[in-house]
């Protein structure tokens, strides 16, 4: 499918530099243009990705020698970890794909704009101000374990507002696909990415209200008796599920949609197993079952044989089905390459490597949720989140590379993108995999001091620190490539692939 679109680039300029700047800012703040709203989400998320990775570097350095390093004050550690966890999931992963979907989906379904554009615009500002409220509260000793009561309340309100923003934007995406498709375009004819945007948005709409409801309970308890939910100490206990698995699975559905979209284009063929691919994407979105019930379901070998069968069955439904969906998308994408005549592109390399990292993260969660491994409370869980978030980021960069001609009218240099993809792969593996190993050594999660264990503790944390640093280079390098392409790249034809 192709689209005819007017690109951003040669916009008319108002008289006078000052007035032109004011007008431009005003247009961006109030715009209902789906591309502008999408770019606001994308730009803010990429900036957040760099800042969160910097936090990862600092945590890694502190963990190299937890008995001697003094980068953080001990009392500040819980707040900073809360900022780190919130940033990975709700400041990077979720809004990044929401922004890409807002920008791209209308182009794919033949709509001139996103449904409820004012709602989508509200979604961005609600998410942004909610995220800023979270930052301010944590800096001021609020959040989980925080000592400033008013700022703990501000943290809860900020998280809720950010979730409302993601909900509002997801509502616009899902409604657009369901009601604004061009005549004759049925749901089963949707492109793979639009299908993933639909299933991912619906899963978000089903799961985030549960999170917001939990915040209400915790907020009421904290501002009153502080008995039922543990006050400021109980926030992580009751909201921790929303910043880890299976909630993260809901937000990576669109990442696999990117690979399913890019693979047949790379192979120069139509998707040979389209129903299977769409089914695989839908299977990933079943992670909403775990998110809505706030449970990942562990395999517990204790009890009778009936208890064991029940445990395995629930574990397979809540954790195994999403893994099966990821495997289906990855394998069918490889099948595309085998059946076609591929010319490997930067977008495909980024999308494929990102999907493999997500696959390792989802598989790691299968290990983590086996009770016999005794990995609960270790940094193994942090490694899973990093595989999913950084893998999702690589897939998002693939989407921006693939749709750059449609969004900016420019093509990003493929050779340089492939080089950055390899740096991003190395960064993801180094940031996450050493934490898998440290998890088996019982390195505790959410702490940087007061732990010790046999083995090369400094090595694992140095490698993880290096991985975060490489990912900072990847994101900044990609943004530099994109800016250079927009400013100096050769314009593409007005007819571009959707």
Image (cartoon, rainbow, N blue to C red):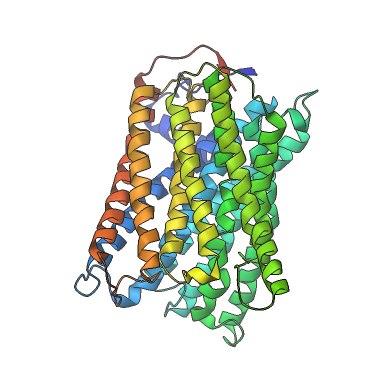
Q: Tell me which residue sits at (54%, 74%) in the image.
A: 237
Depth check, front residue: 9 or 330: 330
User: What is the quadrant of residue 309 in the picture?
Assistant: bottom right
Whether 354 is drawn above or below 188: the answer is below
Whether 170 is drawn above or below 181: the answer is below
Q: Is residue 241 visible?
A: yes
Relative to residue 453, is residue 324 drawn left or right?
Answer: right
The quadrant of the rendering that contains the C terminus is: top right
The quadrant of the rendering that contains the N terminus is: top right
Q: Position of residue 271 (x, y in %)?
A: 64, 25
Depth check, front residue: 33 or 143: 143
Whether 224 is drawn above or below 206: the answer is below
Q: Position of residue 102 (x, y in %)?
A: 60, 37
Looking at the rendered structure, the number of numbered marks drawn on it comes to: 0
Q: Position of residue 60 (x, y in %)?
A: 29, 60
Q: Is residue 173 visible?
A: no
Relative to residue 444, is residue 356 drawn left or right?
Answer: right
Q: Tell me which residue sits at (61%, 57%) in the image.
A: 319
């Amino acid at each position: 499918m192709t689209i005819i679109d007017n690109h951003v680039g040669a916009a008319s300029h108002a008289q006078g530099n000052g007035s032109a700047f004011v007008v431009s800012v005003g247009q961006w703040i109030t715009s209902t243009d789906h591309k502008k709203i999408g770019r606001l989400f994308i730009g803010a998320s990429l900036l957040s990705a760099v800042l969160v990775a910097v936090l990862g570097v600092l945590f890694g350095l502190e963990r190299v020698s937890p008995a001697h390093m003094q980068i953080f004050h001990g009392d500040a550690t819980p707040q900073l970890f809360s900022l780190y966890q919130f940033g990975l999931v709700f400041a990077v992963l979720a809004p990044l794909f929401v922004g890409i979907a807002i920008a791209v989906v209308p182009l794919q379904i033949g709509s001139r704009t996103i449904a409820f554009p004012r709602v989508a615009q509200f979604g961005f500002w609600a998410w942004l101000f909610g995220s800023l409220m979270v930052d301010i509260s944590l800096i001021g000793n609020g959040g989980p374990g925080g000592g400033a009561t008013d700022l703990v309340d501000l943290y809860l309100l900020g998280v809720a507002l950010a979730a409302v923003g993601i909900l509002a934007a997801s509502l616009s995406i899902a409604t657009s696909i369901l009601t604004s498709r061009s005549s004759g375009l049925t749901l089963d004819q949707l492109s793979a990415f639009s299908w993933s945007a639909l299933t991912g948005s619906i899963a978000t709409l089903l799961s985030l209200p549960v999170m917001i409801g939990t915040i209400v309970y915790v907020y009421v308890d904290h501002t009153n008796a502080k008995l039922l939910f543990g006050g400021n100490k109980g926030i992580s206990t009751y909201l921790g599920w929303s910043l880890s698995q299976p909630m993260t699975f809901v937000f990576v559905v669109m990442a696999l949609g990117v690979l399913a979209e890019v693979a047949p284009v790379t192979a120069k063929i139509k998707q040979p197993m389209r129903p299977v691919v769409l089914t695989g994407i839908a299977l990933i979105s079943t992670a909403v079952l775990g998110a809505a019930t706030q449970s990942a379901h562990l395999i517990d070998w204790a009890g009778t044989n009936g208890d064991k069968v029940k445990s395995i069955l629930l574990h397979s439904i809540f954790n195994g089905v999403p893994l099966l969906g990821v495997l289906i998308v990855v394998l069918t994408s490889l099948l595309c390459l085998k059946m076609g005549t591929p010319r490997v592109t930067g977008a495909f390399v980024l999308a494929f490597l990102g999907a493999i990292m997500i696959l390792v993260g989802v598989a790691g969660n299968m290990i983590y949720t086996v009770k016999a491994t005794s990995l609960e409370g270790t940094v193994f869980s942090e490694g899973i989140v990093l595989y999913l978030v950084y893998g999702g980021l690589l897939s998002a960069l693939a989407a921006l590379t693939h749709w750059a001609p449609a969004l900016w009218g420019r093509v990003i240099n493929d050779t340089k993108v492939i080089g950055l993809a390899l740096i991003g792969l190395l960064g993801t593996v180094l940031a996450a995999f050493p934490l898998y190993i440290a998890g088996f050594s019982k390195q505790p999660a959410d702490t940087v001091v007061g732990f010790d264990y046999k083995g090369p503790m400094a090595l694992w944390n140095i490698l993880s620190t290096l991985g975060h640093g490489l990912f900072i280079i990847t994101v900044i390098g990609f943004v530099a490539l994109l800016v250079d392409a927009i400013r100096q790249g050769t314009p593409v034809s007005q007819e571009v692939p959707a």
